[in-house]
Structures are given as C-alpha cells and as structure tokens.
Image (cartoon, helix red, strand yellow):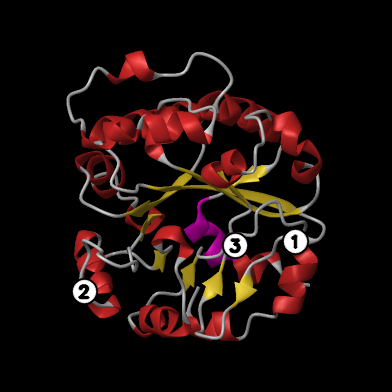
Amino acid sequence: MSRTNRENLDFCKVADFFRSQTICCFTSDIDWSPEWAIQEMLATFENLEVPLTLFITHHSETVKQQYGQKGRFQYVGLHPNFLPSSSHGASYIEQIDYCQRLWPEAKCFRSHKCFDNYLIAKEFHNRGFRYDSNLCLFLQPYCTPLHHCSGMVRFPIFWEDDVHSEQGFPFKTEAIRNHLNRPGLKVFNFHPLSFSLNTPTTKYYLSHKFLYEKKDVQWHRYVFEGVGERTFLMNLVAHLKKKRTRLSYLDDLYNELPTLTEG
C-alpha cells in the first residue's frame, strides 16, 4: 500500500470491518534464540501451513534460508532492543541502524518488550517503514489496526505467550475460547525457545533460559511432555481452520487494507 493510499485510509471503516470480521496473523519475536529453536518453530509452522511474520534481533541462517532465499523478504520485520545496555547500540538511532543492517528489506518493526515512544516510531516512518506491531492489547475485544500519530499503521498484539503464562492461564484453547470467538484482528506472538520446549508455565521457562547459550544441546530431552505452548498452537490452529478463519501475513494484510474496507 502506497503512502498516499495509507493517508487516505478511512480508519472508521477499518474499525467497522473488524467489528464483524476476524483475521488472524501469527508472529514471532526471535529474541536471540538458538538456531535449533528457530528451526523447530519454523518447521512446525511450515508443516501446519500457517503464515508466520518474524521480528529479528540477530542474524539467523535459518531465517535467511527460509525467508531470504525463498523470496519472502517482506515477511520479516525488525525487533530492536531499546532497553539499557542493549547489544544493538548506545542510542535509538544506532539500535535501528544495527537492525536495519540485519534485514535491509524490512518495512515493519516491533520493539523488544514493546518499548515505544513517538521519536522511535517517527524515525522508522522517516526511513520508509509503514506499519508496526508494537502494542500488546492482551485479549482485547474487537482489536483493529490503529493509525499512529507518527504516520505508522499499528497492528496491536491480541495474544502473547509469555503474557498468557504470566497471567496464570493454562495452555488450553478453552481458556481463551470466548475471546477467540469474537470478531476482530487477532495478532498472536510466540517465542522460539518457549515454543520449541512446549513450555507450560513461566517457572518452567525461567528454569530453562540457560538453553539460550547452548548451541549443540540435546534439546529434545528438555521438551515438556504434556499441555504446553506447542500443543496450544496445534489446538488453536485446528480451531481456527475449522471455523475457516483467514490466516494472513502482516504485510499482506497491510497491503489489502484499502480493499478490505471498500464500500
């Protein structure tokens, strides 16, 4: 979608559309995850035929092969860390520069921990970025794309794995079934390590964070055998496909917004 089309977009019509329709977008913050965890997560989404938008923090050969070499550049965004002692740089300009070098084709971003301010969003917009997913509205009814004051279109996160766990929800679709059945934009966010380990609780995840530093670990022996994040995804996708819910990349949805809201 061109800048002109975005500026002419009627966000009242956008909101009306998502009050009666459901579109789901699956995303993942790579978060410095080990390569084996990224490989496992991407393989699972490929097997399920679920489009997955990535937000990258570092170079990954798996992402390069699966998205770069297969011509899916537009489905990778940046995940800069603007928090103190960031490895991405000493200022937000340096941090954005660092991440842009990782994936020059990126046109969207989500900050680590959703860190946000107007200067950051405006800097991205000035660099040609046109949308982000940098706000978590956990289980918010009737989510809709937002028109940020920086000029960006913002796709809020509807569900995030660590928030779900921290709030004490079991990883069962029944726990959020009423929220799933309401219309609206539903952006889901998973993290490779916790997904690959089928993490059942925050405590389990914290006790296995040491695996971030393990490149050649026999990781299968740490996978939780029971109800956890991976089984949640399987059941969630089955539920959405049974209801014939549309699953989309963020970039495809962004480009289609003018068409979706016509009439």
Of 176 and 253, which appears nearest the observer? 176
- Asked whether 251 falls inside the magenta stretch, the response is yes
Per the picture, the main secondary structure of the magenta-coloured stretch is helix
- Asked whether 195 falls inside the magenta stretch, the response is no
Residue that label 1 marks: 18
Q: Earlier in the sequence, mark 2 or mark 3?
A: 2
Q: Residues within 10 Å of mark 2 (few under 14, many from 20)?
A: few
Residue drawn 48% across the image and 25% down it: 198
Could you tell me if residue 199 is visible in this image?
A: yes
Residue drawn 23% across the image and 52% down it: 58
Residue drawn 63% across the image and 73% down it: 146
In what element is the residue under mark 3? loop
Q: Going by the image, does 79 lie left or right of 27?
A: left
Q: Position of residue 201 (x, y in %)?
A: 54, 31
In what element is the residue under mark 2? loop
Q: Are marks 3 and 1 in contact (CB under 8 Å)?
A: no
Residue that label 2 marks: 90
Q: CA distance from mark 1 to mark 2?
A: 39 Å
Q: Nearer the viewer, mark 3 or mark 1?
A: 3
Q: Going by the image, does 216 lie left or right of 212?
A: left
Q: Quadrant of residue 69?
A: top left
Q: Position of residue 78 (x, y in %)?
A: 34, 61
Q: Amino acid at mark 3?
A: Pro
Give the magenta range.
249-256
Q: Nearer the viewer, mark 2 or mark 3?
A: 2
Q: Amino acid at mark 2?
A: Ala
Could you tell me if residue 104 is visible in this image?
A: no
Of 67 and 127, which appears nearest the observer? 127
The answer to whether residue 63 is above or below residue 12 is above
Q: Are marks 1 and 2 in contact (CB under 8 Å)?
A: no
Q: Residues within 10 Å of mark 3 (few under 14, many from 20)?
A: many
Residue that label 3 marks: 156
